[in-house]
Image: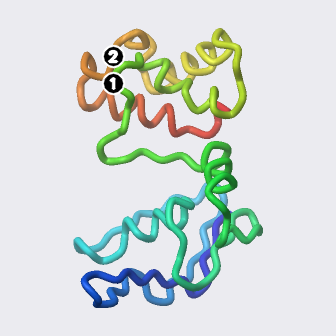
Amino acid sequence: MIRLEDVWKVYEKKGVEVNALQGVSLELAEHEYVSVTGASGSGKTTLLNIMGTIDAPTRGTVYFEDRNITDLNDTSASRLRRKAIGFVFQTYNLLPDLTAWENVALPLYYDGLRDKNERKKRAMKLLERVNLRERATHLPLELSGGEEQRVAIARAYPGCR
């Protein structure tokens, strides 16, 4: 499903090159689960950002479902993320003025689903999957940290789209 071939990421900080990734090659099959572990500064976030099209490698090639995605423009990368890649950020990034179901439904709007009732129906199914249906009308401020995390997981789940 995703393959990296000799991927490098080099940052420049104060005139000094920093190699965040050096020649990383890996292949992950569909439905395969992996953990990315390592010391702070070892390139874990850089690797995930490149795999998720948030960042591009300095050199090397990234494939998603056998399609070269290394040089996608911003619009194409955003479209791929909305359709096939789910992110749950450490800070969850929920919009504070939207309810739980509205946060989950937001990607559907950007995918072109304008029918609010259909978006809510799909969002509610996902909230049910993470045991939060009864909290659907609550704002992030009214949710516990664990509940916010589950809303973010539901929002990231590509299966709702």
Query: Three-letter amino acid code at disc 2?
Result: Leu
Its colouring scheme is rainbow
Q: Residue at x 48, y 47 (%)?
A: 87
Q: Position of residue 69 (x, y in %)?
A: 68, 67
Q: Residue furthest right?
A: 66
Q: Secondary structure at mark 1?
A: loop
| CA gap, disc 2 and disc 1 | 6 Å
Q: Position of residue 78 (x, y in %)?
A: 61, 50
Most extreme residue toward the front is 15
Judging by the rendered image, the residue that carries numbered circle 1 is 96
Residue 108 image-quadrant placement: top right
Q: Is residue 1 above or below residue 100?
A: below
Q: Quadrant of residue 135?
A: top left
Q: Nearer the viewer, residue 51 or 31?
A: 51
> Do tag 2 and tag 1 residues touch (Cβ < 8 Å)?
yes
Residue drawn 64% across the image and 36% down it? 159
Res 158 → quadrant? top right
Residue sitting at 63 percent across and 26 percent down?
109
- Residue 132 % position (x, y): 41, 18
Say above or below: 50 vs 8: above
Q: Which residue is mark 2?
A: 139
